Amino acid sequence: MTPLAAVTGARATELRAAIIERLLNNQALLPDSPTHVMEVVGILKSYGIVLKAYAETLCDISERQFLVLFPFFKYFNGEITLPKLLRHWWHDRINYEYAEYCMRAMMWHGGGGLDAFLDSAEFRQLATKAIAAKLRGNPLMQLVNGLFPEFLLETVRMLCYYSGLGQFWSVMYPIFLTLSDRYDAGEIRSIPDVVDHIRSGLIADAARPITYRVQIRGNSYDIVPASAELTFLADTAIPYVEAVFLRGTPFFGLVSFNAQAQQISRDQGEFSYGALFADPIPTGAAGIPPTLLMQDMRHYLPPYLHEFYRHQGRGEDDLRVKICQTFQKSMFCVTTAAITALAPYPWTTRYPAEQAANREFYEQWLERLATSRLWAVQA
Amino acid sequence: MATPVMPLLSIVLLVPLLGALALSLLPQTSGGRTYRSLAAVVMAIALVVSLAIARLFDPSNAAPQLTEALPWLDTLGLSYRLSVDGLSLPLVVLNNFLTLIALWATSVNLPRPRLYYPLVLLLNAGVNGAFLADNLLLFFLFYELELIPLYLLIAIWGGARRSYAATKFLIYTAISGVLLLAGFLGLVWLAGASSFDFDPQRSTLLPLTSQLILLGLILVGFGIKIPLVPFHTWLPDAHVEASTPISVLLAGVLLKLGTYGLVRFGVQLFPHAWQVVAPVLATWAVVSVLYGSLMAIAQTDMKKMVAYSSIGHMGFVLLATATATPLSILAAIAQMVSHGLISALLFLLVGVVYEKTGSRNIETLRGLLNPERGLPLIGSLMIVGVMASGGIPGMVGFVAEFLIFRSSFLTFPVQTLLCLVGTGLTAVYFLLLVNRVFFGRLSNDLTELPPVAWGDRLPGLVLAALILILGIVPNWLIHWSESTVSLLTPTVATLMPL
């Protein structure tokens, strides 16, 4: 429960040294153990299934709900049937709202090439063209657009994030699902294996282009063209990790905070409310976004992980808290994959200067994660 | 009124007595679950019998009903004489119902079950007898009878300071009994009567001074039992040290013996003297209400807070009893039942919190409403309980308190308004409790709490349901007593300015 920053004295020194040693030796922020491997792979399998649904819906919204101002059926992926509607009202469905929270967090924090492109003249020109095509024959909306010209532009920017995050998750979910398949086949046996698998997946698709195009009355309109040269790793993956894993948004339940007591920084860059900092214990309380993700994942837990949870704590009663705790462990593996990939030198280097540079790099990261849940997952 | 084919009042007394005897004869190897199940069956039978009494009871008839009389010790004026009216009937049903709830809430792993369960049944029989007795000496015998099992139940199965608390309870209640006995003996001797049979006309033959002295003895005697400030100090200790089921009975039923006694042996036996002391009693009620409420605010132990809350809420009963109009007596009866249900629920829930967390300290407990790792249903029921105690409309507490304030305001406007402040203070201390203990993030020390079984939840759910039902349909609570209260206050009602 204690954040790393609260660990002091010899214990803190020992713990930090152990984590840095692990990173320098191509291991992970999360200690290696068979239980951790089983938990992480299991949770990433359910996460992969949920991410697939999130990704498809976000892409669908960006393409088919383009400038639909009242998108009542945006979560239906074009399939509007009475049984699906009843399931939706009964809330027997995936919480796509969580995907939208992540999208908004990315848009709010910005960063990366997509953010920069959306402020460019080129984007404005392309978006204006698409807006004009969409509003053709709609005098009311033309009037609204004339009165508030930035409104639809901003809506298109948001749709670009829908598309960008959808494309990012479209790459990520196969990585998690194949990880599970490889674990089932006996190929994944340790946490470093997990990290290596994720890192390989990220690197394999690092240069994959991120583009966004909509169809309006049979014509294609580029919003984010290939010429913008946006790529998967630099322009969606890194901003996503920054916005969702690290910074987050100060929702109640992520961490305890008090805005009136000035406990929330005015500088978004100093935010530390992301998934790695989330407090799992309030999971399940109303209005806490991570709860939605945990609710979604509980439907797709692999049997071995579900059985493991049944014998922990309160069994089924605190399932979402346990999912959240495991999910954090898995996110530390993803973070490990990201930061080790960004390390200045390969871990195999034998040059002391390069090793020192790597060590300094990891120490900076550890400093940033000081108030995260890293300490809680060390047990 | 239908004619009973069986002496139901005696049966409702005998069932727990015989049950206690049978349980004490069970082989020692019987497990706690067997004792608890059998005791619950006995109490279920007693509850059914009391409901049968209610079915035969004619609410439109103000007079005592289903009277059963047998000569006993004529030379002492003691007779076995039982009857039921609109004052005693709700309390008998409440007693049997809460005893069943208390048995349900008792752990099957309790040590010495062969002694515990017979004592609980004996306690139930004593209280039933006191409510049904139609003879002053018989009432006194039953009043004293319940003292012994309750003392043992606290002294044997209580907390760390159980010996101190039980002894204090015994001393206070014994003094209460002595004062009552003195009052009853004085009344009979001074009136020159040869029998202790209940006779509301007896005191009218006495000079007012004698009436006031006798009433004073009875007031202090029952004031200890209620308890009223400054005779209250035994109650918080007894509650804190008693186990949860015994706290349920103590707050839910035992305290009602005091308020029942005030109406039956104060208002009804000494109507003229009551008229004289009524303003003092109303002011005494204000002191009890405000003192109990302010002390509750100062507590950090949840159980002590609920105990002081009881002192405050019993003050409301005194205010209504002091007013002594038919409506106010009806209000007092409603408050007795209402407080019985609400305090039972609150003590039950505090017991579950203590059992699961090992603490009752509102300064250390936090976030117990956490939906996955906390006690969310227990917390929700606690919110229902404190809302009912605070007099939120739609719950039985509102009905009772509204009747009290409505009926008392014209006679004692200042005292009533000050008691209304007490209602506001109820909201203050219970909001403090709920806010600190149940809201916020779950304390780190409490993230591995054991789950709450349905057996722990059901008694609270049943009580909460009853609190809501009687709040929505208050007629089910008060129509039993509407006729009786006119008979309870014949003289005073004509004397008091309304």
Image (spheres, coloured by chain):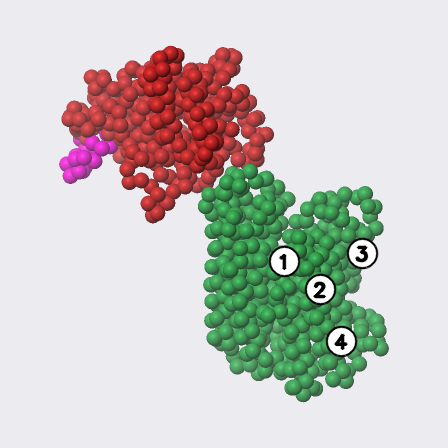
The answer to whether residue A171 is visible is no
As measured in the structure, the alpha-carbon distance from the residue carrying label 3 to the one carrying label 1 is 28 Å
| Type of amino acid under label 2 | Leu
Residue corresponding to mark 4: B197
Q: Amino acid at mark 4?
A: Asp
Residue at numbered disc 1: B239
Mark 3 closeness class: few <14, some 14–19, many ≥20 residues within 10 Å: some
Q: Which of pointers 4 and 2 indicates the residue nearer the eye?
A: 2
Q: Please, what is the three-letter code of the amino acid marked with disc 3?
A: Leu
The residue that appears at 38% across and 11% down in the rendered structure is: A350
Mark 2 or 3, closer to the camera = 2
Q: Which chain is green?
A: B
x then y, percent, for residue A169: 36, 22
Q: Chain of mark 2?
A: B
Magenta segment includes A147: yes
Disc sitting over residue B18 in the figure: 3
A144 relative to B5, above or below: above
Image position, residue B376 (x, y; %): 52, 44
Mark found first going from the N terminus, 4 or 1? 4
Magenta stretch in the rendered image = A137-156
